[in-house]
Amino acid sequence: MSADSPKQPDQLRRGWTTGACATAATAAALEALLTGAFPDPIEIALPNAQKVDFALALENLQSDCAQAGIIKDAGDDPDVTHGAMVMSSVRHAECGSGVRFVAGDGVGTFTKPGLPLPPGEPAINPVPRKMMTEHVEAICAKYDQAPDIEITISVPNGAEIAQKTWNPRLGILGGISILGTTGIVIPYSCSAWIHSIHRGIDVARALKLEHVVGSTGDTSEKAAQAELQLPIEAYLDMGDFAGGLLKYIKKHPVPRLTIAGGFAKLVKLAQGQLDLHSGRSQVDFEWLKEQSKSIGATDRLCAEIEKAQTAKHVLEMCQESSVDIAPLVARFAQQKAQSILDETLTKVDILVVDRKGAIIAKS
């Protein structure tokens, strides 16, 4: 199977993680260091044993080191690292040192507890490290060499790319992380975003924070920050992934969780949806009509709600008619979120935020 295999007509094209690209670049560079020639394409094995070929975009061989580069192809996933060059430089290390990893230009360094490796370590996650180590050991064995190799992973422009990720908030400084558990990017799985939510919770727990906030967007986060005055590490950019947040906190509890979001997003949560993306869940206007009716909406208003096209329009109509729908939505959203979590371990509350950033309801 080729890394630039054509898109299938019946499905979105999958891509390759930064970890898979780093492994391929490392394998190619090591082959060149030991033999004087770069294999192009270079074949590697993914964690599921699938064999994949990667074309080289960079080759640089010197007397004491070799460097190879791979252009990351994320397939049809909107990945911020798509098109980035992942480079690996390898050189012999002192006898008995084994495989060592170094963060080159554009690759971050862990600086806070709670991350996959201790502070001071390069932001190269455990599975990519394992993949690279296994390939180094196999290649060195093939040429009867000791696997004492220093690997420096670099990503030009990685520091700029990292500003579009959670890395600075998580305490991963200087660049991006080298990620991946399978080597494969599944389009629109948003695994990197969910991974960042999980790491944010890990950091908060390691810092012994007792209160974290999951926000659906920047406006709701800023409203929560003004309201709650918590450390920056307490704020998690949940986005649409309420389920990803709640399921991880269920396994890794924090005493208090606040979910802050816009009215439409929290209507979906109140209705029982855990994926709040507009393409994967919809507002139920019949449900909104019935809830509005239960708190005094007239028949005329109920008819207008049933015909509404957006949750924002429903909120505006209810506000004009003094029907306080937002607190009711907050209560149902709180009940749904709390139903997933053990109340003795994590208590949930809700902040409903309007488009201007004002908090219009709390549970």
Image: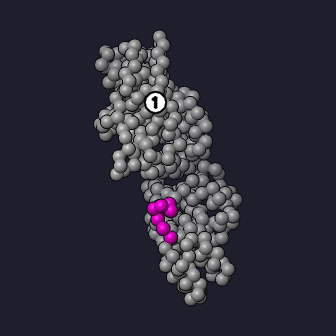
Q: Is residue 162 above or below residue 87?
A: below
Boundaries of the magenta span: 276-283
Camera-side residue: 166 or 101? 166
Local packing at callout 1 (Cα closer than 10 Å; few below 14, some 14-19, many 20+) is many
**Left or right: 142 in relation to 28:** left
- Taking the spot 48% from the left edge, 13% from the top edge, the residue there is 62
Rendered-image quadrant of the C terminus: bottom right
- Taking the spot 56% from the left edge, 79% from the top edge, the residue there is 305
Rendered-image quadrant of the N terminus: top left
Looking at the rendering, which quadrant does residue 140 occupy?
Answer: top left
Q: Is residue 200 above or below residue 24?
A: below
Camera-side residue: 347 or 324? 324
Q: Could you tell me the amino acid type at mark 1?
A: Ile
Residue 20 percent across, percent down from the top left: 41, 35
The residue labelled by disc 1 is 70
Q: Is residue 101 visible?
A: no
Looking at the rendering, which quadrant does residue 293 occupy?
Answer: bottom right
